[in-house]
Image: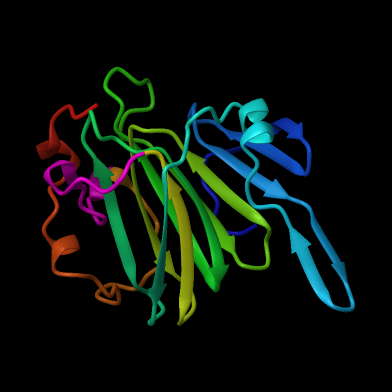
Amino acid sequence: MSGNTGLELVATLRSGHFEARRFDIDGPLLISTRRLADTRGFFTETYSRRHFAELGVAEEFVQENQSLTLCADTVRGLHFQLPPRAQAKLVRVIRGTILDVAVDLRRGSPDYGRHIAIELSADGDEMIYLPAGFAHGFVTREPETVVAYKVSDTYAPAHDRGLAWDDPALGIDWGLPPGAAVLSEKDRTWPRLADLGPVF
């Protein structure tokens, strides 16, 4: 996989059809599933509460969201919700390819301010699990990209926050030339890490 940062390949967990690999930042997991294919197409499990619990994912996901992004080079993020409405997320790509990014914002974490970046695609049978305490975002590599993500709490506008995607202090390589990013007005206004203060 190209464009990956912070993935530790030595620690692997397995349960049912699922396999999880740890990052060198504690908490997130890269989870892959088995695809059963024949001449008709394929079948795959994308979630199992029992097997995910055995992999260390204990949250109950209460909502699933789906986004369609029409243009390549679109950045969505970096988003999070404040406690007590913080969200764990389980992110997968239904169509297209993204670079998925998460920044550790957990107070007291030895990895505070560090990030992971992993390329996910509809063909890869992989998803990323993020516990609460991370700012999350992605950039699309292809037009008409569809992303689905489960969350452990519903959307709470009063707790909705973000982090500047292009903060130089984060050192994120989005793989974009200067000025190429397509952004919402909201995502242009988030503060930098130095101005954020403790949130989790």
Residue 163 lies in the magenta-colored region: yes
Q: Is residue 16 left or right of residue 84?
A: right
Rendering coords of residue 44 (x, y %):
74, 58
Q: Who's the residue at 25% across and 56% down the image?
A: 166
Rendering coords of residue 180 (x, y %):
30, 77
Q: Who's the residue at 49% across and 29% down the image?
A: 27
Residue that extends furthest to the top in the rendered view of this protein? 108
70 versus 123 height, above or below: below
Q: Nearer the viewer, residue 197 or 194?
A: 197
182 versus 15 height, above or below: below
Rendering coords of residue 59 (x, y %):
48, 31
Q: Kindly indicate the quadrant of the structure image that contains residue 195.
A: top left
The answer to whether residue 159 is visible is yes
Q: Kindly indicate the quadrant of the structure image that contains residue 110.
A: top left
Q: Nearer the viewer, residue 54 or 99?
A: 54
Q: Which residues are magenta?
A: 153-169
Rendering coords of residue 10 (x, y %):
71, 31
Q: Who's the residue at 42% across and 43% down the image?
A: 62
Q: Quadrant of the N terminus?
A: bottom right
Q: Quadrant of the C terminus?
A: top left
